[in-house]
Amino acid sequence: MPLRVTRPVTVFAVAVATVAVMLAVPGVRAKVIDGLHLRDDAAGAATILPDGTVKGHGNLRIAAQPAPPALPTLVGGRGVTVETKGFASWALMDRKTGKISGSSNYISGTNSTESMIKVWLTSDYLRLLGSKQPTAQRLAELSRMIRDSDDDAAQDIYQVNGRNTTIKRMISICGLTETTMVNGWWSKTQVSARDAVRLGQCVASGKAAGSKWTSWVLSEMRQVRGTVAQEPNGGRWGIIDALPPELAQDVAIKNGWTLLFEDGNWHVNCLAVHSDWVLSVLTRYPGGLGKKYGAALCQKVAAQLLVYPK
């Protein structure tokens, strides 16, 4: 019959159980922790010296945490080639410096704003409320105007804001110098690419909607939806299509697009706002080329301005 040694195991089990019982008693646990020189309060924390070493422990060093990887961004002053069968203009504002660069006609060339101006109509309405709160119905209307580019909502708010008066306020508050109003038409307001980025900056800085509502407006712009193929309200395309997901998620956009029968041209514009920059692209071209043609022009401009960190 083999010999079985069980006593050491039994003794060990009893010892573990005894320690567990002792540590379960607060007074005993405190003495054990104190005896082992363990401290979990701030007063007992070791001092970390400027070189990363811990005071009293020359061989112990706290490693610095690596900075998060830099994200790609848009940078001006780069050569951008835009081949089009019509009109195209673009401008990029560096929001840190305020510097604006763009195509050779970014000041002289203008286009009708179309739905791009809806970010102003929304912002102007909210700022004019002052301390008042919009009704749930009105806020839903403003949301539709941006997310789904609802023209009926835009016309309603244009009327409430005072029609021509709201456009005059936009020019004044946002410091627009090439923008001209067309009596009774919010969508036909003429704007340059330079003024378009100024409008984007006006919204992002809080001038347009005021401090209370700016974050809400930008959030709605980040939730613009619908592909370029979805008519009449699909508005998530253009500049945003050139950006990698980690950058696109922080970009607020509002595009404008209309096939005008009076001149037979598509008027397609793109506006994108980021914490570091604002980009606008204005296009106008023969109607037979379709809406996707303008969306692709916006995408191509943004793609050429995109810089990845080395």
Image: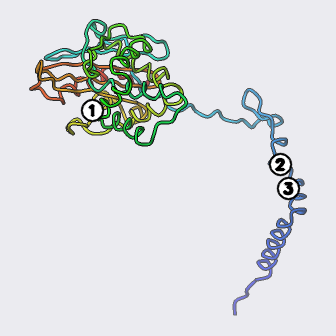
Given this view, does label 3 or label 1 mark the residue nearer the observer?
1
Spatial CA span between label 1 and label 2: 65 Å
Left or right of residue 295, residue 137 in this image? right
Q: In this view, does 271 lie above or below 225?
A: above
Left or right of residue 294, residue 123 in this image? right
- Nearest to the observer: residue 120 or residue 134: 134
For badge 1, the amino acid type reads Asp
Q: Residues within 10 Å of mark 2 (few under 14, many from 20)?
A: few
Q: Residues within 10 Å of mark 3 (few under 14, many from 20)?
A: few
Element assignment for label 3: helix
Residue that label 1 marks: 151
- Nearest to the observer: residue 291 or residue 161: 161
Residue that label 3 marks: 33
Q: Residues within 10 Å of mark 1 (few under 14, many from 20)?
A: some
Is the Cβ of the residue at disc 3 closer than 8 Å to that at disc 2?
yes
Choose the circle earlier in sequence order: 3 or 1.
3
Give the residue displayed 81% in from the left and 34% down from the top: 55
**Dividing the image into 4 quarters, which one contains the N terminus?**
bottom right
Q: Position of residue 169 (x, y in %)?
A: 41, 16
Q: In this view, does 97 lie above or below 248?
A: above
Element assignment for label 2: loop
**In the rendered picture of this protein, how many numbered marks are placed on residues?**
3
Give the residue displayed 44% in from the left and 14% down from the top: 173
> Residue 196's quadrant in the figure?
top left
Choose the circle earlier in sequence order: 3 or 2.
3
Given this view, does label 1 or label 2 mark the residue nearer the observer?
1
**Dividing the image into 4 quarters, which one contains the C terminus?**
top left
